[in-house]
Amino acid sequence: MHNQVVVIGSSNIDLIARLSHLPKPGETVGNAESSQAHGGKGANQAVAAARAGAAVSFITSLGDDAFADSMLQDFKRSGINTDYVVQHKNTPTGTAYIWVDAQGENSIAVAPGANYKLSPDYIDECRILISGAELILLQLEIPFETVEYVIDLAASLGKKVMLNPAPAQKLERKHLKALYNLTVNETEAAMISGLPVDSPEQVMEAGKKLLSMGPEMVVITLGSRGVFYLTKREQKMVEAYPVKPVDTTAAGDVFCGVLASQIVQNKKMMEAIKYANAAAALSTTRLGAQPSAPNQQEIKAFLDQHEF
């Protein structure tokens, strides 16, 4: 199989409790509704890219529990190549414990589990796969040293790397310089650039600062304010699609995965961002992380209804 996108990142099981209010220390809230869903930034982005039409291989680390088995089945159903998914004995699959109150506010605790066993040594075992990729997509829910190792390896192989630095963390200039695409939200843009992003002018300044740090292209997602992207040759603001959100979980991951799928299909950047924007907007009208990622037909239908 020709591997257009190789996603390297995390897989979590999300254990969700919907409550009337978030418990205070020592308090028990007894009216919770529980559910579980597949999540993790790497997995969300891999699923989104595959459903949007890219040939996707996923490098991730799972435990040896029932959660891992159901995740693998789901990846395969989404058309993802799972040959490079590694499972570790006596290790739990990554787990996120999510409490959500009646207003939609949440508290989250993440137990990385097997995600933190995705090591540079294992990346070496995946060198053939990485060398055949058109684009490598990364986030920061796996060991930071592994992310840095992948960026260095990809640079030595002349590969395009797209990084979504979430959860937000500062990066060394040498790694930023090796990136083809840096996609950040407002929090990440402010942390890495050191500049505020409240007004359109501030977003532009932060974007220019990020671009000066080395990536070929910077994309800043701004929720309902849209998306700002810039390269050395152009800069544009792309409007958001108006929707009534039900659940914004993983909207950013859907955007990243779908944008990656469009880049490897050689779409013009404006079109690629509009397509990713539409997919992210559509995902917010559905519950859950991976279940909310739309397929190509759904994205096209949404675009037909919402053309500016």
Image: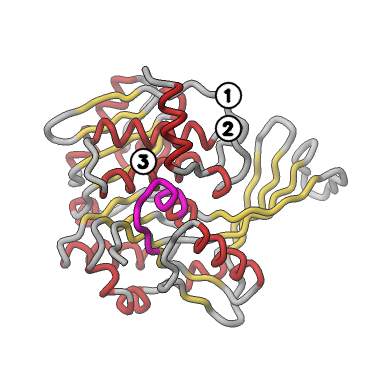
Quarter placement of the C terminus: top left
Judge the density around disc 2: few (<14), some (14-19), many (≥20) Cα neighbours within 10 Å: some
Query: In which quadrant of the rendered view does residue 23 lie?
Result: top right
**Residue 254: which numbered mark, if any?**
none
Judge the density around disc 3: few (<14), some (14-19), many (≥20) Cα neighbours within 10 Å: many
What's the CA distance linking mark 1 and mark 2?
A: 7 Å
Q: Give the amino acid type for the residue marked by disc 1 in the picture.
A: Lys
Residue 167 lies, with reference to residue 65, above or below; the image says above
Q: Secondary structure at mark 2?
A: loop
Q: Is residue 229 left or right of residue 189?
A: left
Residue 173: x %, y % from top left: 22, 52
The residue carrying mark 2 is 285
**Residue 244: which numbered mark, if any?**
1
The residue carrying mark 3 is 184
What's the CA distance linking mark 1 and mark 3?
A: 23 Å
Q: Residue furthest toward the left? A: 233
Residue 87: x %, y % from top left: 52, 77
Residues 91 and 281: in front is 281
Disc tally is 3
Q: Residue at x 53, y 24 (%)?
A: 243
Q: Give the amino acid type for the residue marked by disc 2 in the picture.
A: Thr
Queried whether the magenta region covers residue 48, the answer comes back as yes
Q: Secondary structure at mark 1?
A: loop
Q: Give the amino acid type for the residue marked by disc 3 in the picture.
A: Val
Query: In which quadrant of the rendered view does residue 213 lie?
Result: top left
Q: Are marks 1 and 2 in contact (CB under 8 Å)?
A: yes
Q: Residue at x 23, y 67 (%)?
A: 132
What segment carries the magenta color? 47-57
Quarter placement of the N terminus: bottom left
Q: Earlier in the sequence, mark 2 or mark 3?
A: 3
